[in-house]
Image: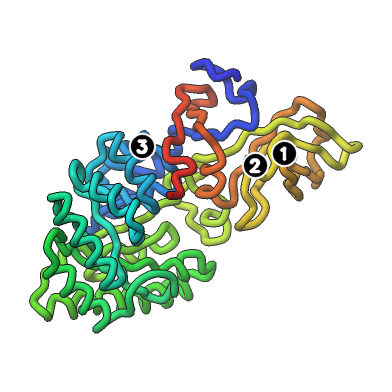
Amino acid sequence: MNSAIGTPKEVLDTPALCIDLDVLEANIMYMAQAAHSMGVGLRPHSKTHKSPAIAHMQLAAGAHGVTCAKIGEAEVMARAGIRDILIANQIVTKDKIARLMGLAAYTDVMVAVDTAGNIADLSAAAEAHGVTLRVLVEVDIGLGRCGAMPGEDSLALARLAHESKGLRFEGVMGYEGHTVMIADEDERRRATEASLMLLTGTADWVRSAGIDVKIVSSGGTGTYKITGAWPGVTELQVGSYGTMDVQYYENVGMKEFNYALTLAATVVGVKGSERAITDAGIKSLTKDFGWPLLIDPPGWELTGLSEEHGWLTRRGGAALRPGDRVTVVPTHGCTTINLHDEYHVLRDGRLVGVWPIAARGKVR
């Protein structure tokens, strides 16, 4: 594989998942400045980029911690020296709880809880391992996934966590995942604010019971301006803004960020002048949010994906030949990144590094 430093993007072995370092840095700085201007903390979600290198860039720009989806991701971030980690999911099995206690022994890991039984299990394990585990009560603010109901149910869990040995209750979290991709901005704002009222109202209810609530954590890339400005929210869990993808940029309109993430592919075959076949199929690109966007060369569209091949249709551009290069932007960065072992990091179109996607495949 051609991955020598200084290699031009045009001759990288393909398919190659690429990061434009200038754009990545600009995206990270924009969000950091936005969070600072709104007076909220930043805890970026590493489930998108799965890279300790990028997480450290986010921390250097002002983030105070990271968010992870799975304990496996958290273990990768911890091995890279990151201490303040939120696992924004429930850890419920015996084996995973044991791993969580191992993390708590040398990091400031924090985990979401939404049932009394899980709180009891975590408390018993923390006592047995001689650690203190930080917890947030997750509140279901409309997504209908995990989380306790707002109000009395969440208060009861907060009280239990606050009183349980081995645990330190830190606050509440809730994810407005059902609103982050609403295309209409006014509708997205209305739906998000309705959800945030449930979250911050629950936090106030817990405080009225005499329990301190330090953290109220929420937010996604599509709602960061709404959630970050909402009174009572203390931190944002945004993820996709750093690399950006078609779903957020084109469909949701997050055009203050730019595409740092692209996939370089090679034309391996043609069918006359109207069709071309590349070496990047669904083992290199996901289509869960629709067809990825072909941005170079102009006048061609990605219209199909099989296991190892991409199918291109001509829309007025110049004819392609085998060996020509194309550049594609993923529609969904998170799932596409998880297919790859490494980033080809570019500046001014030349390779400056190859970064392992260290948390790739960490689904446990």
The kind of secondary structure element at disc 2 is loop
Look at 12% across and 80% down and name the residue there.
208
The kind of secondary structure element at disc 1 is loop
Mark 3 highlights which residue?
52
Task: Choose top left, top right, bottom left or bottom right for residue 211.
Answer: bottom left
| 137 up-or-down from 279: above or below | below
Amino acid type of the residue tagged 3 in the rendering: Pro
Determine the residue located farthest toward the left in the rendered image: 210
Task: Choose top left, top right, bottom left or bottom right for residue 127.
Answer: bottom left
Mark 3 or 2, nearer chain start? 3
Look at 38% across and 45% down and name the residue there.
72
Q: CA distance from mark 2 to mark 1?
A: 6 Å
Mark 2 highlights which residue?
283
Determine the residue located farthest toward the right in the rendered image: 272
Mark 1 highlights which residue?
308
Q: Nearer the viewer, residue 299 or 241?
A: 241
| 253 up-or-down from 362: above or below | below
Residue 64 visible here: no
Q: Position of residue 221 (x, y in %)?
A: 42, 57
Q: Position of residue 355 (x, y in %)?
A: 44, 29
User: CB atoms at circles 2 and 1 under 8 Å apart?
Assistant: yes
Mark 2 or 1, nearer chain start? 2
Amino acid type of the residue tagged 1 in the rendering: Glu
